[in-house]
Amino acid sequence: MIKENLNKVLENIEKAAKVSGRSPEDITLIGVSKTIAPENIQTLVDLGVKNLGENKVQELVSKMPVIKGDVKWHLIGSLQSNKIKYIAGQVFLIHSVDSIKLAENINKEAKKRDITIDILVEINIGNEETKHGFFLEEAEKAIEKISLLSNISIKGLMCIAPFKEDPEENRPLFRAMKALYDKYAKESPHSIHMEYLSMGMTNDYEIAIEEGSNMVRIGTGLFGKRVYQE
Ligand SMILES: *Cc1c(COP(=O)(O)O)cnc(C)c1O
């Protein structure tokens, strides 16, 4: 089933990339493996998906040594400062930097280890109280403040758009994300190196790609519906 799902997703990515005048290789597919059993994750990796996303530090760290292959791990869920030490230097990208305080603490940990940590700034694009991230109005100030931290490199932006029955409704939000991304892609002060626009999940990734996303995070569309324990 995973193979069929993946083929369908890749087909959709290709179509959407074409609409936006790009090729499918320009889009990074992250398989979101939260709650998924290691053998099923391994199946996906063996089929060629080399980027995996987890939203909890503990789950990520426990799966990391179990999955074989040249995998890039992404932390996509909210990060508590006391857990930074477990993933510093271990993950390819932290997608979920949603406060200045968290950025400062990541910077501190990076300094201690004499490394640079690549991050995305999370934007609460739907202005939802239940979601994390900077509001669009405060985003520029936040990005510029974070960019001054010596051991953090801002590699792009991330958002979780509101869930909509009709994902078309999210198109203007994705467009606003792309506009902010482009602003810093053109003239990048300090340590801003816009490479990744992480937006689009199972329900809305095609629209996100059409509007400029180059990194999609897909769980259900690859593995089927998640079953949460407890
Ligand atoms: C779970 C999750 C996803 C994947 O969601 P699906 O709808 O299953 O594709 C993407 N991004 C984040 C941050 C998530 O927590």
Image: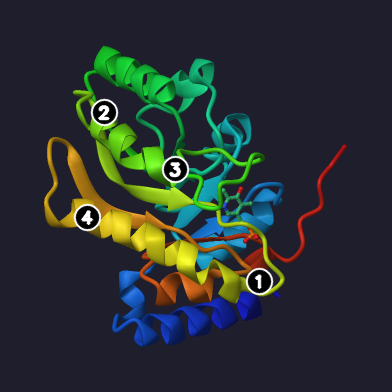
Q: Which mark is residue 183?
A: 4
Q: Residue at x 56, y 57 (%)?
A: 161
Q: Are marks 3 and 2 in contact (CB under 8 Å)?
A: no
Classify the position of the C terminus by image quarter.
top right
Circle on res. 182: none
Label 2 environment density (alpha carbons within 10 Å; few <14, some 14–19, many ≥20): few
Label 1 sits on residue: 2
Q: Secondary structure at mark 1?
A: helix
How far across and down, in percent of the image, does residue 146 sit? 28, 29
Label 4 – label 2 distance at C-alpha: 16 Å
Q: Mark 4 is on which residue type?
A: Lys
Q: Amino acid at mark 2?
A: Lys
In the rendering, at what x and y percent does residue 19 appear? 38, 86
Residue drawn at x 64%, y 39% is 129
Q: Which residue is mark 2?
A: 145
Which numbered disc, 1 or 4, marks the residue closer to the eye? 4
Pointer 3: what residue?
122
**73 and 17: which is toward the camera:** 17
C-beta proximity under 8 Å, tags 2 and 1? no
